[in-house]
Image (tube, helix red, strand yellow):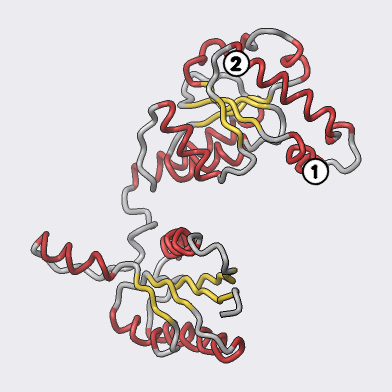
Amino acid sequence: MNGRRTVFFVSDSTGITAETIGNSILAQFEGVQFDGHRIAFVDTPEKATAASLRIKTAYALHNERPIVVNTVVDPQLCEIIAQSGALMIDVMAPFIGTLELELGTRRSGAVNRAHGMVDYHQYEARIDATNYALAHDDGVNVDYTQADVVLVGVSRVGKTPTCLYMALHYGVKAANYPLTDEDLEHDHLPKRLEPCRGRLYGLTIEPIRLAQVREARRPGSAYAKLDRCKRELVLADQIFQREKIPSLNTTHTSIEEIGSKIMAHLGIERHMF
C-alpha cells in the first residue's frame, strides 16, 4: 500500500451521512492519506451506472482499488455501484436487518430521508436559529434575551462559525460578542453581558495560530502582529477566570467538537437535524 487511497462517499441523498460516518472511520488510520469524493443523489439506475463508471475509472487510473462508503438504500442500485470493483462499505446494512426483525416491519426503501425537510417545525427552528446567529453576530445586536448561548472572545477565535454550526445542525440560538480593546482594559465583564452571565462561554486560541488567521485576513496589519495577539488573549483569559466564564481553546479542536462541548457544558440538549 502506498499510503494514499481514493474514497467515494456515495448516497441517494445529500451524502452528508456517508461522508460524516466515513471520515470518522477513516480517521482511525493515521498512516494513510485519503482523497475523498462525494457522489450524491444516486437514486436511479442511470446515476448508479455513471457513479460505477467514475469509480471504475479511478481504479484504472491509480491501479489501486477505491473504497466506497455507501448509504444508498436500494439493493439494485448498490449492485450496480459494486460492479465498479471497489471495496464496498455499506453503512446501512449492519442495522437494517436487525431493526426489521425487532420492529416486525420491512424498511420502506425511501430515499432522501436523513436530511430532508421531514419535520417542518424542526426545519423552521433551524432556519430561525440561523437567522438569529446572523443577526447577533460580532456584537451587532446585543439584545441576548432569546439566546441559548453567547460566545465571547477576541476577534478571529472561531465564534461566528461555531454559532452558525450550532444553529444549522441543532437549532441553537447562538450569539457572539467580540471583546474589544476597551473591554479588555477593564477588570470586569462588559455591562451588556451581565444579564446573560449564565449563558456565556469563552473561546480562546494559541497566539501563533491567531496571528496566522488574522494575517490571512489583514496582511501586514498591526491587528495580526503576534505581540498584540498574545496581549489580547492574556487579557481575555483573565476576564474568563475572574468572571468564572467557562472557556475552550479552539486551536486543535474542530467546530463540531467545539459546539458539542459548549452544549454539553451548558446543558443544552438538542438533536442533530
x, y percent for residue 228: 83, 27
Q: Where is residue 75 in the image (x, y as percent from the top left)?
A: 28, 80
205 shown above or below 115: above
- Residue 256: give its label: none
Residue 186 lies in what quarter of the image? top right
Whole-percent x and y of residue 108?
21, 68
Residue at the location (69% across, 8% down)?
187
Q: Earlier in the sequence, mark 2 or mark 1?
A: 1
* Left-right relation of 215 to 149: right
Q: Which residue matches tag 2?
A: 241
Q: Are marks 2 and 1 in contact (CB under 8 Å)?
A: no
Considering every residue shown, the one lying at the far right of the view is 220
Q: Quadrant of the N terminus?
A: bottom right
Dot 2: what SS? helix
Q: What residue type is labelled 2?
A: Gln
| Numbered tag placed on residue 217 in the rendering | 1
- 169 vs 108, left or right, is right
Residue under the point 57% across and 91% down? 60
Percent coordinates x, y for residue 122 in the rendering = 36, 43
Q: Nearer the viewer, residue 114 or 198?
A: 198
Q: Which residue is drawn at 11% across and 59% down?
A: 103
| Residue located at (58% from left, 12% from top) | 243
Q: Distance between the residues labelled 2 and 1?
A: 29 Å
Crowding around mark 1 (Cα neighbors within 10 Å: few <14, some 14 to 19, many 20+) is few
Indicate whether 9 appears above or below 165.
Answer: below
* Label 1 SS: helix
